Amino acid sequence: MSDTSEPVFQTSGPVWLRDFEWGLTGLTVRKTGARVPYSPSIIKQVSAWFRFFFAAQSIEPRTPSFTIAFTPERARPWYLIWAVARAAGAKLAKDPAHADVVMQFEDATYSPNPPPPQLKPGVRLINFACTDVSKSKVARACATAFGNPLAIDPLTHVGPAVEKSEINAAHDGRIVQCPTKPVAGRVYQRVVDNRGLDPELVEDLRTCTVGGKAACVFIKRRPVTKRFVNTNAEVLLRAPEEVFSPEELGKITAFTQAIGLDWGGVDVLRDKSDGKLYIVDANKTDMGPPITLNLPDKLKAIRMLAGAFRAFALGTED
């Protein structure tokens, strides 16, 4: 593999810092216009992220190196692939035509972007077949892979249901009583009882996948009353084999194949009543590792993912 490009993201600091407008009382995200006021909780989260950011750069990249390009957007340091690619030995190629690996990277629900016309022979393409990660698409793929229907008809269903945005990463879910008139742009799904051993906490099994296969699992626990909020009371790192059976791992792979996901994270819920699994969300521009996870396990997760990503990128996986 080529070793002629700059080390991945070593000079990206000044670039990604310009993604924000820094004010005295808060910052503004230039792309979306969203304003984030400074607060004790935000400052704590930012401090934890910077500790991880600098620690992750101490991981010795694997050798020999290979080149990677992102299109249409460059992955920023807060995305999981940033640290994983670096640890895997990737170096950034600004022009996809010169890259050994080209990843479709756009933080959007729908992203039908074809590969660039000029590519190296034998290039590894990642996520170009994953053009739709909407909630309805995810529900259909879940039913296909697991045989467990997730979507419900709000006009005929009787009882509680989850109503949430079709758009990815909105974190706006809520429980509604059915039957009810559907709202445009919203999807309706069964309520999965994903409480763990502690009945006051729900568990999301955020499963990172590489080459369609589960590579590590973040067990994310939060209060039942905050089940739709992306704030965790506790996060644990586990190997996939500690959480899922071989049959379940095969079904997770079948799900990723159904939506064309080569790299990304899927939110898996295990129903307490019958043990069945449901995938309720898929994200190909995963952020992370989760802020609440302790720093040693964050670095362990990066190493686990880097090994799997390198093998997939170079075509040496089993």
Image: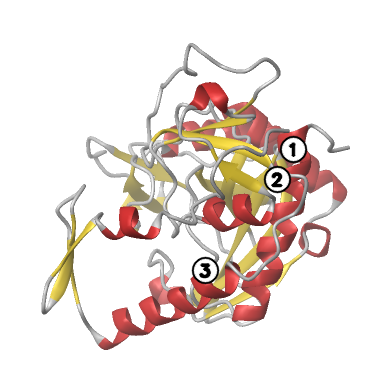
Q: Callout 1: 10 Å neighbours few (<14), some, many (20+)?
A: some
Instruction: Measure how far apart labels 3 and 1 are at the Cα level.
Output: 23 Å
Q: Secondary structure at mark 3?
A: loop
Q: Secondary structure at mark 1?
A: helix
Image quadrant holding the C terminus, namely top right
- The location of residue 284, given as percent across then percent down, is 51, 42
Q: Nearer the viewer, mark 3 or mark 1?
A: 1
- Whether pointer 1 and pointer 2 mark residues with C-beta atoms closer than 8 Å, the reply is yes
Q: Please, what is the three-letter code of the amino acid marked with disc 2?
A: Phe
Query: Label 3: which residue?
Result: 290
Query: Label 1: which residue?
Result: 312
Q: Secondary structure at mark 2?
A: helix
- The location of residue 14, given as percent across then percent down, is 32, 58
Is residue 14 toward the left or the right of residue 311 in the image?
left
Q: Earlier in the sequence, mark 3 or mark 1?
A: 3
Q: Callout 2: 10 Å neighbours few (<14), some, many (20+)?
A: many
Q: Callout 3: 10 Å neighbours few (<14), some, many (20+)?
A: many
Residue 272 in sight in this render: no
Q: Please, what is the three-letter code of the amino acid marked with disc 3?
A: Pro
Q: Earlier in the sequence, mark 2 or mark 3?
A: 3
The residue under the point 77% across, 50% down is: 63
Q: Nearer the viewer, residue 163 or 95?
A: 95
